[in-house]
Image: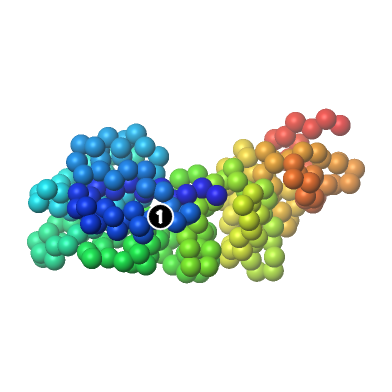
Amino acid sequence: MEKIKVLALEDNKRDIALLEDALSDKHFEIVAIDSELDDAIQHYQTLEFDVVIIDIFISNQPLGIKFAEIINTSNIKKPFIFLTSSIDKNVFNTAKTLDPNNYLIKPFNRSELLFAIELSLESFLHTEGAFANKQPVFYNKAFFIRDGKSLVKVGIDEIKYITIEGSYSNMVTEKGDFIIQSSLNQMMNGLPTDTFIKSHRNYIVNIEKIDKIYTNDNLIILTTGENILLSRRNRDNLFNKYKVLK
């Protein structure tokens, strides 16, 4: 399972420790916590990550504001959360003009931080309420899904297939299954068509996971040995995308 990657600009040792502790579970990875603006800018431009946490005041200067301004003019768009202990109205009003995807007041606890990350992703992608409604969000070449109380990240290369189960879809991955409230057509809209194909009205399959295709039986065998239905209606489309020896 891929981890949700976080970049942070923070110079307070206590708050750095809180961030590290809050994001220490198997679903998250801190790619860097920078205490200098220049380092944060460099890492923003060079590292792979999903969300940014920005302390507004660094060395008692509002350098987090400057960082947010750089983010907003960058070609690389990522969701960011302002983190601050200041309740100064002027600071808050300035921060709001930069359209942060969330705003977290110190001191914070783990639950507040994780919820802020969820809301920042929804805000950035204009999918408010998706996680509460068990709907996946596609971003940064991965699906973000609420699994119980945790937010998980599923890379598209981890998906074997997706099948319909009543009014829900079941995303079957190498690390487990996820029940989500989205139709197959909605899921297909978020997937790269060069890798995923609808093989049947009830199935979407990752063509990279296909081992064999039995054309006479309209059956796909995955590298894991699982069987996937292949309808005649979708067979020609699959053959056009996947080299099949007849």
- Residue at point 14%, 62% (across, down): 86
| Above-or-below relation of 233 to 108 | above
Q: Do we see residue 190 in this rendering?
A: no
On screen, residue 226 versus residue 142, left or right, reads: right
Q: Residue furthest right?
A: 216
x%, y% of residue 154?
A: 54, 51
- Residue at point 14%, 57% (across, down): 94
On screen, residue 72 versus residue 30, left or right, reads: left
User: How many marks on residues?
Assistant: 1
Rendering quarter of residue 167: bottom right
Q: Residues within 10 Å of mark 1 (few under 14, many from 20)?
A: few
x%, y% of residue 161?
A: 68, 50
Give, as a three-letter code, the residue at label 1.
Answer: Ser
In the depicted view, which residue is nearer to us: 174 or 71? 174
- Residue at point 29%, 58% (across, down): 18
Q: Name the element at disc 1.
A: loop
Position of the C terminus, as image quadrant, is: top right
In the depicted view, which residue is nearer to us: 4 or 118? 4
In the depicted view, which residue is nearer to us: 80 or 110? 110
x%, y% of residue 186?
A: 58, 57
x%, y% of residue 198?
A: 69, 49
Which residue is identified by label 1? 24
Colour treatment of the image: rainbow
- Residue at point 74%, 48% (across, down): 199
Q: Do we see residue 192 in this rendering?
A: yes
| Above-or-below relation of 229 to 133 | above
Rendering quarter of residue 17: bottom left
